[in-house]
Amino acid sequence: MLRMPELYRALCALCLVAPSFTAAGATAATGPVPPEKLTVEKLAPRSPHWIYFVDESLYNDVDARIVLYDGDQHRELGQIDAGYFPSVNVTPDGRTTIVATTYFARGSKGTRTDVVEFTDNATLETKSEIIVPSKHAQTFPTPYGASVSDDGRFLYVANITPATSTTVIDLKSNSVVGELDTAGCVLAYAAGPNRVSSLCESGKLLTITLDSNGKEASRAQSEAFFETDKDPVYAQGLDSSEGVVFLSFLGQVHEVNLAQAPATIKPPWSLVTDQERGKWRLGGNQMGALHKGLKRLYVPMHEGGEGTHKDGGTEIWVFDMASHKRLARWPITSRYKLDPITAVQVSQDAQPILFAAGSKADVKNAQFAILDGLTGAIRYVERDLRVVPWLMLNP
């Protein structure tokens, strides 16, 4: 160990050497180093096998991220920063990603700013943003926290303060044009050019129709289609060709048609047989995926009773939406030695692939599998994914 006088002499010697080193370097240099120019590369044409991993990590709430992943090349293509508990969606033309989120001036505290950010899907650059009232519903990521009308005109941002409402944004003028009181009903399920629905504790859907200026013209409620105290539904619905499909805790499938107001609901059907009821359940944070063209429903299922509605699936069950028949049971955790599946998504092409992610509560990374959407055959397994997908979304 150097004593103080020795340390002082060593530092002085270093000071004497440094100028000669700098001078030699300067003599050898041929000229100033040119400044680096930053450029932005465009992504390749969008593939149906691209997927968004929306990571709302419990280890870093204030810095969620959206990772664009190529399911054929098995690599990350880019990332979109997403703030605090974001809601994520894509415009109907597929060109823009929408993130409704919150920022605080000092990370997790300080002045709150709620904003909707618009990202160019060709470059992943933020194109614009709109400041919205500081009421954005801070929930786990969902496409129904920020949904877009079919014609791309209106954007609906769900609010909870804890009073519930929906902020209406006119994307033509890029401005907030109003707020809809949803009377205790939550989230925003867009339909048509001017209708938005919210899910109510009464088991009904509230549908509000807008006029050409984005103001409320009328409202209507559907018939009750579930009982909250007996068999609630997951608010994380699945987009269908007619509207949205809700899955219940006990495995009931409720198909909702949003083509008119009020919404209409088909008779429910069950994922489980009488012998399986009460023994097999669905669970996780994204507990179903629907292929609209093939009308196939993919659901992670596990053996469990009451209170296991957040548990991941040890198997993936495949159903035909037309006949309500179970087509297959894929024992993914035993076959591929993955953690129970908490999130699934399926590509929408004729040769679909199924994305299945699973994680344990005490880990920061996820295990991840890509399967053939028709046969269940494994295509790829990654056992240490960098993010934990709470939501997987087709970009």
Image: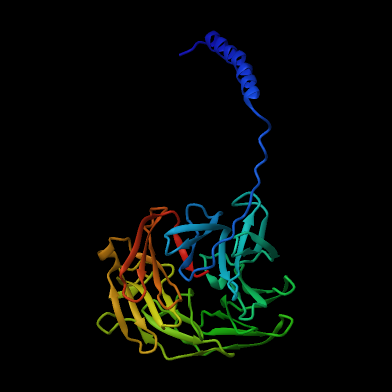
Q: Is residue 39 above or below residue 284?
A: above
Of residues 369 and 372, the one nearer the viewer is 372
Q: Is residue 281 left or right of residue 184?
A: left
Q: Residue furthest front?
A: 30
Q: Residue at x 44, y 57 (%)?
A: 75
Question: Residue 130 location in percent, x, y?
Answer: 70, 65
Residue 13: name its quadrant.
top right
Residue 313: name its quadrant.
bottom left
State how many labels appear.
0
Q: Is residue 251 left or right of residue 219?
A: left
Q: Is residue 96 left or right of residue 58?
A: right
Residue 308: name its quadrant.
bottom left
Of residues 249 and 17, the one nearer the viewer is 17
Q: Residue at x 56, y 9 (%)?
A: 9
Question: Residue 362 location in percent, x, y?
Answer: 38, 53
Q: Is residue 34 above or below residue 378?
A: above
Image color mode: rainbow
Quadrant of the drawing holding the N terminus = top left
Residue 278 makes an appearance in the image = no
Q: Residue at x 34, y 65 (%)?
A: 379
Question: Residue 149 location in percent, x, y?
Answer: 62, 79
Of residues 273 and 94, the one nearer the viewer is 94
Question: Residue 40 location in percent, x, y?
Answer: 62, 55
Residue 191 makes an appearance in the image = yes
